[in-house]
Image: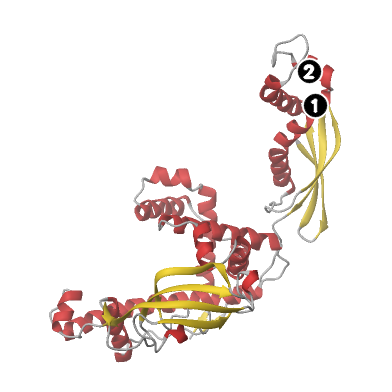
């Protein structure tokens, strides 16, 4: 297999002309014959027992060409791309066989390639760090958050529903008098004011009491995920079964002893102050890195193929599906609950996918321009860190993560640190 020629047909699209030699082609044909020959009927032979030469004589020697070429395309194209010094992006590939015979075949492939980008002025970027001062106000907010986490829901029977309550409701939605799919639930716990339902829904529960049956009228937003409901007026029949409010515990020394190992309010506040100082420091560092990332993205020069963003969004969707499965759900169930489909969900990931791709390309270019290197010791240390993190043996981690990929990731991290070390942080 060899690369005959390569040329750029448009930005980030290259045409490769690839030649596959006769030996490789014949080996692939033999593989196809072994797989498919057993199902071929030839007069005078038991099914699947006719020699390849007889089958080709009866049906034509080209009978196995197409399958053999399909078997060889991926490796041949991969080797040609390496020889051409390009990286093929998972996208539409246009294939055209120009010659084929016993001595091999030649094909042309038009592929999307990883772009060549440039970046300059990445040292000396000016960013402003967030304050890491732990004020009394921040401590008080943290105490309220801890009280919230340790609160309990209590059924309310002596008043109507109000903002912030949990309303346990049955509901069924109708458009033009007809119930629509996904618009019905029983004993649903809805926090009033959460904004989890369409605009106007939650507000109309306020003022109603336990066991009330009533109707809510709303209009679906024009940008709603379900096309059939966009902009439509809807009526929901509601049964309010229960109203719950969240009661917070008193902030006293008994509370302090329950949520910490401290004895007094003063000791607990000092502990919180120390923890918050570390948290604010981390948040400030992350914010600085986010600001630097945004600046680097702005500095990129070059055109990036849309396919790279789409591939990254698809990968993010797969990761999301895996997280859902770990929680006992799957992507299809999630989409039913949210009214989204694969296209709309993927589209929601596109802005973040674009940022990820642009930042990665920017940092990879900095690695190249600054001759950033990763040592064998760096790689081994990272394998050990990952093994500790995931409670796995180092060799098992190495089986999962290739050293080349790990090296590239570490180089990118070093490039980011280099940008950070040379930034002007105020």
Mark 1, secondary structure of its residue: helix
Give the x, y percent position of residue 20.
77, 34
Kindly identify which residue carries mark 1.
63
- Residue drawn at (15%, 77%) of the image: 257
Furthest-top residue in this view: 44
Disc 2 packing (10 Å; few <14; some 14–19; many ≥20): some
Horizontal side of 244 relative to 194 (left or right) equals left
Q: Nearer the viewer, residue 103 or 175?
A: 175
Q: Which residue is mark 2?
A: 55
- Closer to the chain start, of discs 2 and 1, is 2
Contact check, label 2 and label 1, Cβ < 8 Å: yes
| Inter-mark Cα distance, 2 to 1 | 9 Å
Q: Residue at x 45, y 59 (%)?
A: 324
Residue in the picture at 57% in, 79% down? 125
Q: Is residue 59 above or below residue 330?
A: above
- The N terminus appears in which quarter of the rendering? top right
Left or right of 424 on screen, residue 78: right
User: Is residue 72 in sight in this rendering?
Assistant: yes
């Amino acid at each position: 297999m060899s690369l005959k020629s390569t040329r750029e047909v448009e930005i980030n699209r290259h045409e490769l002309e690839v030649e596959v030699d006769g030996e490789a082609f014949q080996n692939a044909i033999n593989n196809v014959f072994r797989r498919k020959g057993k199902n071929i009927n030839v007069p005078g032979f038991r099914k699947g027992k006719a020699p390849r030469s007889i089958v080709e004589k009866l049906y034509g020697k080209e009978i196995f060409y197409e399958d053999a070429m399909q078997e060889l395309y991926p490796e041949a194209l991969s080797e040609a791309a390496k020889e051409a010094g390009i990286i093929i992006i998972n996208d539409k590939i246009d294939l055209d066989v120009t010659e084929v015979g016993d001595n091999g075949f030649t094909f042309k492939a038009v592929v999307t390639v990883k772009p060549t980008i440039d970046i300059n002025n990445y040292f000396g970027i000016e960013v402003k760090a967030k304050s890491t001062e732990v004020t009394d106000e921040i401590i008080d907010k943290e105490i309220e958050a801890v009280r919230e986490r340790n609160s309990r829901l209590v059924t309310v029977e002596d008043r109507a529903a109000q903002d912030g309550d949990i309303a346990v409701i049955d509901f069924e939605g109708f458009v033009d008098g007809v119930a629509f799919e996904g618009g019905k639930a029983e004993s649903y716990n809805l926090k009033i004011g959460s904004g989890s339902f369409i605009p106007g829904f939650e507000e109309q529960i306020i003022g109603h009491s336990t066991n009330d049956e009533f109707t809510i009228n709303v209009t679906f937003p024009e940008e709603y995920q379900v096309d059939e409901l966009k902009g439509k007026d809807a009526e929901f029949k509601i049964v309010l079964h229960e109203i719950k409010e969240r009661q917070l515990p008193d902030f006293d020394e008994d509370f302090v002893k329950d949520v910490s190992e401290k004895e007094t309010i003063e000791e607990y506040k000092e502990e919180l102050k120390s923890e918050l100082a570390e948290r604010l420091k981390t948040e400030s560092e992350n914010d600085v890195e986010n600001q630097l990332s945004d600046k680097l993205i702005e500095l990129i020069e070059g055109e990036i193929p849309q396919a790279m963003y789409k591939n990254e969004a698809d990968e993010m969707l797969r990761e999301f599906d895996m997280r859902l499965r770990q929680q006992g759900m799957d992507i299809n169930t999630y989409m039913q609950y949210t009214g989204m489909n694969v296209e709309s969900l993927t589209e929601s990931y596109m802005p973040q996918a674009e940022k990820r791709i642009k930042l990665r390309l920017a940092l990879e270019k900095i690695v190249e321009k600054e001759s950033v290197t990763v040592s064998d010791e760096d790689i081994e240390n990272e394998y050990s860190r990952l093994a500790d993190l995931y409670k796995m043996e180092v060799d098992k981690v190495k089986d999962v993560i290739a050293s080349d990929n790990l090296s590239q990731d570490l180089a990118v991290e070093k490039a980011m640190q280099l940008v950070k070390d040379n930034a002007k942080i105020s």
